[in-house]
Image: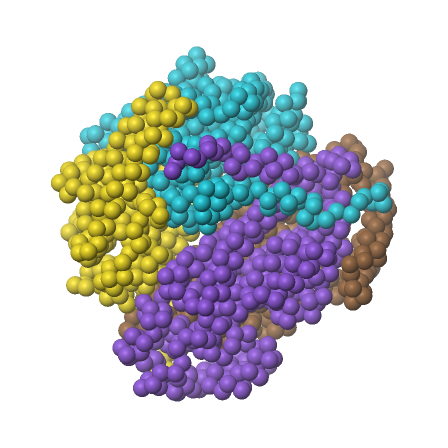
Chain colours: A brown, B purple, C cyan, D yellow
Amino acid sequence: MKKNIEPCYYGDYLQLDKILGAQALQSEKYGEAAHEETLFIIVHQVYELWFKQVLHELNAVIDTFNQDTVKDQQLPQVVLRLQRVISIQRLMNDQIAIMETMTPQQFLSFRDYLVPASGFQSIQFKRLEISLGLKREFRIDFDQQSFYNRLNDKDRALLEGLEKKPSLFELVDKWLSRMPLLKMEDFDFWEYYKNAADKMLQDDYDTIASNEMLSDIEMRQELKDWQATKDNFDALFDHDQFETLRDEGKFRLSHNALLSALFIKQYSEEPVFNLPFQLITALTEIDEQLTIWRYRHAMMVQRMLGTKIGTGGSSGHHYLKKTTESNRIYLDFFNMATFLLPKNALPELPESVKRKLGF
Amino acid sequence: MKKNIEPCYYGDYLQLDKILGAQALQSEKYGEAAHEETLFIIVHQVYELWFKQVLHELNAVIDTFNQDTVKDQQLPQVVLRLQRVISIQRLMNDQIAIMETMTPQQFLSFRDYLVPASGFQSIQFKRLEISLGLKREFRIDFDQQSFYNRLNDKDRALLEGLEKKPSLFELVDKWLSRMPLLKMEDFDFWEYYKNAADKMLQDDYDTIASNEMLSDIEMRQELKDWQATKDNFDALFDHDQFETLRDEGKFRLSHNALLSALFIKQYSEEPVFNLPFQLITALTEIDEQLTIWRYRHAMMVQRMLGTKIGTGGSSGHHYLKKTTESNRIYLDFFNMATFLLPKNALPELPESVKRKLGF
Amino acid sequence: MKKNIEPCYYGDYLQLDKILGAQALQSEKYGEAAHEETLFIIVHQVYELWFKQVLHELNAVIDTFNQDTVKDQQLPQVVLRLQRVISIQRLMNDQIAIMETMTPQQFLSFRDYLVPASGFQSIQFKRLEISLGLKREFRIDFDQQSFYNRLNDKDRALLEGLEKKPSLFELVDKWLSRMPLLKMEDFDFWEYYKNAADKMLQDDYDTIASNEMLSDIEMRQELKDWQATKDNFDALFDHDQFETLRDEGKFRLSHNALLSALFIKQYSEEPVFNLPFQLITALTEIDEQLTIWRYRHAMMVQRMLGTKIGTGGSSGHHYLKKTTESNRIYLDFFNMATFLLPKNALPELPESVKRKLGF
Amino acid sequence: MKKNIEPCYYGDYLQLDKILGAQALQSEKYGEAAHEETLFIIVHQVYELWFKQVLHELNAVIDTFNQDTVKDQQLPQVVLRLQRVISIQRLMNDQIAIMETMTPQQFLSFRDYLVPASGFQSIQFKRLEISLGLKREFRIDFDQQSFYNRLNDKDRALLEGLEKKPSLFELVDKWLSRMPLLKMEDFDFWEYYKNAADKMLQDDYDTIASNEMLSDIEMRQELKDWQATKDNFDALFDHDQFETLRDEGKFRLSHNALLSALFIKQYSEEPVFNLPFQLITALTEIDEQLTIWRYRHAMMVQRMLGTKIGTGGSSGHHYLKKTTESNRIYLDFFNMATFLLPKNALPELPESVKRKLGF
């Protein structure tokens, strides 16, 4: 086989003529080359290369979940691919420090030439958001407007097409809600769980009510938070109430998917749950890393521009800070600890159930 | 000399009997040892050791600035000490990942035994905040209340004493405002600057007004932001207006200190400004790292507890998120880019001025 | 239950009086306090706290493998604990940068007071090495001598006792070699494998022999390396030859354990192999991180002392560099790629075999 | 001015068509696309982009030092550029973890198609080595051969041209040796220094000789190391002996440059030495980070290939490990602690000297 393979050279293979020939300074076009513009370009190009890699992994994972049935054999691969995405996200977060070696004044020496270019025109980043599950209906008002309004027709069409395809969020939700974890004869798990939860909530209530260190205002706030938690718990056992809260944006996962995820987290040490647990953990981590990225990115933009408007003609760091919390996708996994009960408050899984679960 | 030195042994020197004997599990006291409680204790003890080191550096820097005159010879040391603080902050931020290897369910197995202990009782962290400059008047209402209300009398007294001493923020402000950068005969820097700034603002206005990609709502928001920036610029040249904005919390630095810092940043490449520039940059970075720490910490708490109340009887992550932005100390340095002008819009510093500046 | 729990306070719980009261400067005892000695002490105390945590995890994993049978249900926990060790190792590696904020001259201001203390007296680090599997017979001559000669009787006795207990390496070796992967009727895996390996080796030989860019010397070296690889391959199928190479230190794993590990790596995507694969990967990573730590540590010592002798009366960085490569424990896992064949050169696992493998 | 600037678009500005269109899989050309080949290509392309940025900074620094006189005003910029290089190096070191998310088996699925491409063909990396100062005469034999033998004529010519230009090492050496630190009337620094050094060496000798914990072999080794240190010290004061040691490869810096660097390090807290001290520290750090990169890179290659030959037809990790220590450039700075004396053993700099030093 090897016989027919043509020799491969490093620079040709990596197409370094393209990669290393793609740094044309705007400052040079209009005047003197600004030393730091090279850094600015290269940092963004590196981000785009990583975005391409992240999309490569996400698309492969989406393809897997898009099949009629996900085979057990495919889960290890899915988990490794998502963990690779996390590794890349960590590096991208640290990469912000490289941009911060540029002083605001150095940036000023070429920023006027970049108008109206803007990081908001990164199609790959928008594809990444949509693929993960950040579709139009989940964007806050501000972002629904601005998401599409700096794009040309071709790019807008591409993204609008993507909005119509199932996102990873939707596919994982469907996969979780199909799991046969919820109705098991001979095993009254959810009733058991409800009793244990009620006891825990009562304990929490007593802890707050007897906390002498809280001021009146704080006490009221804490009791309000407690009530919200209780409402969420009640909704776990009441499909209609759950759907109401979901309509209000309190949950994004479907009722069944949330219950399955909760079950998996409660019994995560079971070998049969190991891969689903890793999957849920990986998606939680991806959401956390993306949030950290938005937050650090917002701070970097502020440090570079202060309250000046950005090259795109708007203050980027306002937008970035606003969307840091609102644009979270897998927040239900993140918040799942709300519903977790301690190990010793839970029943041991019966053998019959474990066997049944070999999904 | 060496003759009189007694032999020193590793374990004794580091007092490892104390350090390694200070992990007593609450879970073991009341029942079965929870494996992860050891991690929980050690992670917090490591944080406290780093806090001690950070305070050691900050106090030394405060002592330096607390003298009648800061000697040139002391600035390199001050900068190195602040840079060490930043290195430690970076490590502390990464350390959050260690705590996140504990699952929420593992935490549940011992959290009930910790009531009402809370990270808000870390006296060292509060000392660190106050020493950096986060005194009572700069805390948001919510935090003014809660800052002191979980402490015993001795700790409260200690912190209240510290509130009365000059913080690093105040000392640096004084040091900057004393610099002879502002009134220099024969050099009309600030007039020159004002003209250049007016031109830049006009350009920004035109950029926004002609940005066809903005919706009406966005346009209004952008013009509002622009007006705020313009007001800030105007205040630079009008002491009364500056003081008004400062009273409203728009600035924390005094007028003169802000102008000195701005001058230093504009001419940061001058060797005579190198150390002051490094100092300002280091304080900016300390603020940024502290903000990242608050934000990541808030997320970690949310991941561990969801919306459950914390062991201190309140939802820690609410508090942490609220204070992430509000508790910033050196925000004026952070935002300073607002006022920076490009190199080519600035006059060269006359030799006479440079000589005069040898502070 | 909660009723009987006494209130817990942050500072008491963490025993901060001990932790924060354990920094006594030698420099202060004999003269003026050296500012950086506090850093030196705290950095080492933090390392010792992390060592305690790593030992806590390793001992728990060793206990699990020390049972007659390791239950499937325990593997997820084992993997998570080893992954926690890796997270801590990464942080410890980054922590070296904190020590490097101390200049060599700052170190000089107190190093004379530390004689003859030395990091080689860290009992916890030695316990960690022995527990992982770095027992006396695997240390290089130089290290066999120096490992025990700075310790007091009690510490030496403790470590010598530990040498007699099974290490994690030995336990994992036993666990792997017991796996029923090697003799499966109706499935001629190893014969299949041998044929594929022979073909690959022949291809490699041809690649080298036809590489016109190699000088004569390089060619000879490459062919020698190829022959060594071939000998290793041959040993896979010949128990006696394997034992000979093992006696020469070319392998540390037993023959059966190596074959099991190879099988698992070849079919790592099988769900049934997922946890064993993660276990092997984690041990590989622990070895890599430990090696990086030794290497970076050696460089830090060299940077701090140059070729001066250390406080322990010997040049630490010589020792550290010498042991960086020689003291590797799970090198066989690390080198396992030597024997891997591409997916398409391997047979699909028959269903009957998969079922049988449900260990 | 802005009026004449054409609108700039994000994707065009970054030439994303080139950047994102430069990933052509060899596996796809000859068979089925290997999922991980995309990662392999992108990781290497990102490295090449960073290499371009590092070269951009190094070349600017070289240009600065290549002038007849380096202006004070240029030193802050030089230091910031070298610190940026360090930030990038740290990120590149962490990036190795991304490659390690690829399993050896995944690599096997396309490595045969890459023959004989090899990372040794990275011209940018070779330029980086030569520019820093790793010229032919400082390479070990093995590397002198292999450095040029995989290149085409054009690339070889380019590098051989670069070998003839002054490297950063040579320029910094010249800059240091021109400093007027060495002959100062009325200030007998070097005699003072010699006496203090002799005393320190005698103390070290006594410490070793009285160390009862050393075995005979260790004692001999330590005394041999001590003698080597003493010889180095003696050479500081004896130009001929220094040149002899330099010819033997014990030093790379010229005699005068080493003495200047030593002087700067001894008095690094003097503001006038602050920038030169930062420069020396930055070059030390660049060398350390490069060494860590080589070491981690070697381990990654070994983990991926074991002892198999690489695609370039040779075992890369052998080469990489061999060159890790031998290819160090600024080792004299790294080892400088050898010669440092404690602050209290040094004379205060006379005012007259400080004034004179305003270089």
Quadrant location, the C terminus of chain B: bottom left
Residue at screen point 61% across, 54% down:
B124
Question: Does residue D82 appear in the picture of this structure?
Answer: no
Q: Is residue D217 left or right of residue A193?
A: left
Residue at screen point 56% across, 62% down:
B131
Q: Is residue C20 left or right of residue D85?
A: right
x, y percent for residue A93: 50, 56
Q: Is residue D98 left or right of residue A166?
A: left
Q: Nearer the viewer, residue A161 or A349?
A: A349
Q: How many marks?
A: 0
B56 up-or-down from D17: above or below: above
B80 up-or-down from C66: above or below: below
In the orientation shown, which residue stands out farthest toward the top? C240
x, y percent for residue B216: 58, 83
Quadrant location, the N terminus of chain B: top left
Residue at screen point 55% across, 65% down:
B167
Q: Nearer the viewer, residue C219 or B103?
A: B103
In the orientation shown, which residue stands out farthest toward the left? D240
A311 up-or-down from D43: above or below: below
x, y percent for residue A94: 48, 55
Q: Is residue A30 left or right of residue A339?
A: left
Q: Nearer the viewer, residue C229 or D180?
A: D180
x, y percent for residue A198: 85, 50
Residue at screen point 64% across, 71% down:
B137
